[in-house]
Amino acid sequence: MRFAYPRPQLERAHWLSLDGPWRFRFDRERRYQHPDDVPDWPSRIEVPYPPESQASGIGERGFNPACWYEREFEIDARGGRVLLHFGAVDYAAQVWVNGLRVGSHEGGHTPFRFDVTAALDPSGRQVVTVLAEDDPADLTKPRGKQDWQLEPHSLWYPRTTGIWQTVWVERVSRTYLDKIRWTPQVEGFSIDFEARIAGDPADELSIEVELRHGERLLASDRYRVIDREADRRIVLSDPGIDDFRNELLWSPERPTLLDATVTLFHGAERIDEARSYVGLRSFTILRDRLMLNGRPYFLRMVLDQGYWPDTLLSPPDDDALRRDVELAKAMGFNGVRKHQKIEHPRYLYWADRLGLLVWGEMPSAYRFTKTAIRRTVREWTEAIERDYSHPCVVVWVPFNESWGVPELNAVREQRHAVEALYHLTKTLDPNRPVVGNDGWEASATDIIGIHDYDADPEAIRQRYGGDSTQLFDRRRPGGRVLTLDGYPHRGQPIILTEFGGIAYVKCPAPGVTQGWGYSRVEDDASFGQRYRGLLDVVAHTTLFSGFCYTQFADTFQESNGLLCADRTPKIALATIAEATGLTRTYIPGVV
């Protein structure tokens, strides 16, 4: 099995992965509307890898607007309910079980599931069929870094069509735990717990929650379910002095997780149980500084595209996700900005477990229309819902560099879209900062993000290290201003959220000879020297509350990673870590 349980914060003991070989065919002319229409299955594909990837066994990177999948599985249809889950299918999916349509979903980065109980064959042998539709030329759908041209160009990469995360089934009781959600309250040393129940209506339902730190029991409470909901605050015993409090707080330096068991009862009968976890941490803003657990915290982040050479958007396996988290930490970073991708939940699990902050960013559409905004709102809402309880996720970013809203200065509808997504995000999650539009042309935002790829450390020092009173009146790369008229800097933290981008073609991707970046070096020594020079200036510029270096690994034609595409370090990890500031305790502006 390549992946562990795909939903790490509501984990049941028994489940069946449907990853592996499926029957497959392209439907480029969109001839078929129902599984019975499909005449034959000329290919086999390895799920969850997209057909554009080599790992899928297909490796076809042309324009593929539709494709079909099918496979058998066995599950007993007697008693309880059976849920069929999809981690992500790009872009729209229709699903049949035993020839019966069980549902559809639109949105290429977020999970969905269907109760397929009524469609099951009593024999236990089942057939699932999926139609995935993904118009490669449609610029109104959130697509992130997926190119709309035949071959990847500039900073866009190969497309991902169809299933690209785990497909799985699980049996539940007739009434079952549908969702759980954790909201830590560090100031009150408590945790808000929410649960939603689905399935058959039932009286006398209650939920028991146990929280443990290792072998130590912190809480054991039972709550009555009313109207299919249970919302309670779990108050922990405050250990008093910081030494004991810090033992329970989550941070990259000490990623303490509290293990949870959530049990649903019908009267005295245990009818559902799930394992979960929560991190007790806060991430807030105090004037111009970021605060982790009530203390000033300097962000050292790296931009991470989340692509792999042979599997594209889909990770090779669970070990690869863990390794990416470990490599980011080994290079001295305490966070990543996941760029134009809603990352796999198992990555967030390892970031929770190992201690790495994550900025969650919405993949962009590239044409401004009402359809594009409706699609973005729907998928962004699902992404926030999916990742809300992960302690590693500390900032939300609905827009990047005005992509999809290219005329913010002139078109009021586009400004309203950014402001609306900012306020929607704050409504769905009032506990995390939101960057309305990262890079430039900020309006509604909690943090000012600046993108500046000047390769000269001294120019960076002069631009940001001296008098900053005129900074917001100057134009940045591309002729963009940092803030829109009517939205002056109100003292928010300022972070250099993209810089560097040093191209060093040490391990070129197939077919790539020159590579691409914002500046270029030719050997190890020059690469290390330029990286150190930039980091030394940025990390010690008092204007900044953090930085995000571009980028984690080479990605196809972009050769500006600290690592090769296969995650081989271009120079020693220890050298990178020392320059990044692994041992530094310096926090600009804080004595």
Image (tube, grey):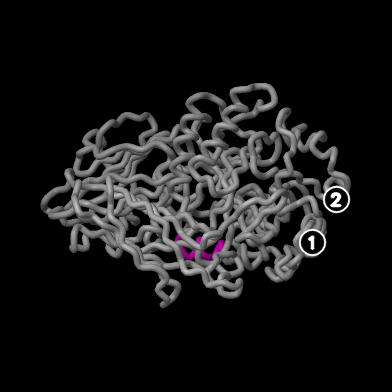
Instruction: Name which of mark 1 and mark 2 comes first in the sequence.
Output: 2
Q: Work out whether residue 523 can be spotted.
A: no
* Quadrant assignment for the C terminus: bottom right
- Mark 1: amino acid: Arg
- Mark 2: amino acid: Gly
Q: Which residue is mark 2?
A: 465
Say whether residue 496 is left or right of residue 18: right
Q: Is residue 391 above or below residue 44?
A: below
Q: Do residues under tags 1 and 2 come within 8 Å of each other at their CB atoms?
A: no
Q: Is residue 579 above or below residue 363?
A: below
The answer to which image quadrant residue 107 occupies is top left
- Identify which residue is drawn at 48% across, 65% down: 319
Q: Secondary structure at mark 1?
A: helix
Majority secondary structure of magenta residues = helix
Label 1, label 2: how far apart the Cα atoms are: 17 Å
Say whether residue 387 is left or right of residue 265: right
Q: Give the magenta-colored segment's residue range.
A: 317-325
Q: Residues within 10 Å of mark 2 (few under 14, many from 20)?
A: some
Q: Which residue is mark 1?
A: 532
Q: Position of residue 164 (x, y in %)?
A: 42, 49
Residue 578 is inside the magenta segment: no
Q: Position of residue 398 (x, y in %)?
A: 56, 40
Q: Position of residue 145 (x, y in %)?
A: 57, 42
Which of 75 and 535 lies nearest the eye of the viewer?
A: 535
- Identify which residue is drawn at 42% across, 76% down: 216
Residue 324 is inside the magenta segment: yes
Q: Work out whether residue 315 can be spotted.
A: yes
Which of 68 and 215 lies nearest the eye of the viewer?
A: 215
Comparing labels 1 and 2, the label whose residue is closer to the camera: 2
Say whether residue 60 is left or right of residue 275: right
Which of 253 and 450 lies nearest the eye of the viewer?
A: 253
